[in-house]
Structures are given as C-alpha cells and as structure tokens.
Amino acid sequence: MAMNDAGQLRFCGPGAKECEEFVAGVIKQAYEQGKPRDDAWIADFAATCLAEDALRWWIGQDKEVQGSWELLRRALLSRYRPLFHGHSGEEAEQFVFSVRRQIWDAGKQKDNDWVITFVSDCFVGNALRWHVSLDSSIREDWKLLEVAILAQYPRDEQSGPVLKMPVPPLAAAPPQNTKSRGRIRTSKNNETKLSYLSKNLDSSGRAQVTSSATDALEVEYNPSTSSPQALLIPDGQIPNFDALGARWNSQDTTQTMANFPGKK
C-alpha cells in the first residue's frame, strides 16, 4: 500500500501484508468521513484507490462484490495471500504462521488439497525457484512442505536465551600401544632349516617345533606391563594357556633346553 501525490490511499498489491494495511486504511478513512456503516460508500471509495494488479482484479469481480465493502474486503483478503521471497529464516517463520492462520480462518485444517492450492501461489523470486524444484511428494503435502521451508531457510542466529554448557576438558590420549607380536624361531647348530615353536602340543603336553609358519605359535610381548615380564599367548591358540614359560633340563646351559607353555 502507498499514498499518491494527493495523499490518497493507493493499493496495487501484491501480498497479504499490503492488503491488510489497505483495508485498515479504508476503514480509518470511513470513520474520518463519518461513513463507518455505509457499505456502498466505502466500496466505492476503496475502488478509487486500486491500481495495477489490484485494479485488474477488481474489474473482474461481479457487481455485487464491487458494490459491497463487506464482500469486497473479504475478496481482497482472500485474493492477496502472504508472499514468501526466501530472504531469511524470520520471513520463513512468519510465512508459515500466516498460512496457518489463513487455514484456520478458512476452516480448512483437514483439507490438504485446499491448503496446497492456496500456498502454491505464495512463492515468489528465489523461493519460487526452490519450490518448483521440490519433489512432488513434498509440494503436495503441507505438513512436509512447512518442514521443508523451515529447514531450507533456518534462522541466522538464535534469538532466545542459549544455555551455555561447560566444555569438558579433552580426554587424555590413550597410551601408545607398545605390544610386539611375533613367532619364536628355533635353530640347531649347523642347520639352516627354519623351525618355529609350534602351537600344537605333543602327547605329553609339551611344546614342539614345526617348520610350518602357519602352525607356528604367535606370542605377544608388552614391555609396559609391570614385572615380571612375560610372553603372552593371545587369541586362545593353546587352550587353557595364556603365557609361555621355560625351564632348563640341566644345570649346564650349553645343553638342550625344553620349552613348554604354562599359565601366567
């Protein structure tokens, strides 16, 4: 809504906000002229204030609507809907609120088709391009569409109070894994063949050697653990045993040594 050079009301459109301001201005003018109950006079006065799109729309109305302010103002408010340009999150919230109010006033809360038809004419500019690009399942369901609008156009900042939670200190980095894992290789004097300690025990329950790396026992050593140090047997390779032990068969350490698993 605007004023012409003579200070007279002028309404061209295009949206609900301007239309509401125009209707309020006409009512105010009617009171100032002492004509608040003169339905025909107010309708004629309002017609003189219309221009451009609003004037073309008025010309298309029947004489009954043109001649009655009560009918004309209802038709105006129905014709000029809330427009949504997609400028900001606040505009998106106001648009959704305005549409909900229009739905309530029209008693169409359960009529999704009516709502979608009403809303489809409210998008302009970038918002219109966005609306057209939506999947039809969203465009044709108001409940999904209003969620999409508020998600696409979020608030720039939180306007309400924000609860500031203390930031917990960063957790200490976990200790570096220093475990070593490997096989135990055995050898005899003057023998080049590689052998390993086997994960398969002999009939007496003692460890034996194998030439197959697949059958070799894998052990784990972790120097970070407290004393005494141990060679662990991970992954249950030998049932009921989780560590490796050793003993000498003789006080003479130059002689052969027998190795066997033992409980940690």
Image: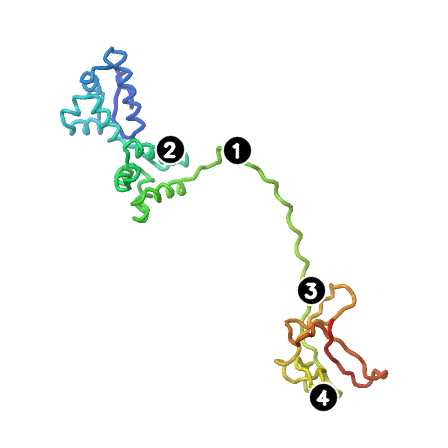
Which residue is the site of mark 3? 178
Q: For numbered disc 3, what is the local secondary structure?
A: loop
| Real-space Cα separation, disc 4 to disc 3, in angstroms | 33 Å
Q: Which residue is mark 2?
A: 94
Q: Amino acid at mark 3?
A: Thr
Q: Amino acid at mark 1?
A: Pro
Numbered disc in front, either 4 or 3? 3
Mark 3 or mark 1: which comes first in sequence?
Answer: 1
Q: Quadrant of residue 209?
A: bottom right
* Mark nearer the N terminus (4 vs 3): 3
Residue position marked by numbered label 1 in the rendering: 161
Q: Residue at x 57, y 37 (%)?
A: 164
Coordinates of residue 79 in the picture (x, y in percent): 24, 31
Q: Nearer the viewer, mark 3 or mark 1?
A: 1
Task: Give the spatial CA distance, label 3 vs label 1.
Answer: 49 Å
- CA separation in Å, label 4 and label 2: 89 Å
Whole-number angstrom distance, CA of label 1 to CA of label 2: 20 Å
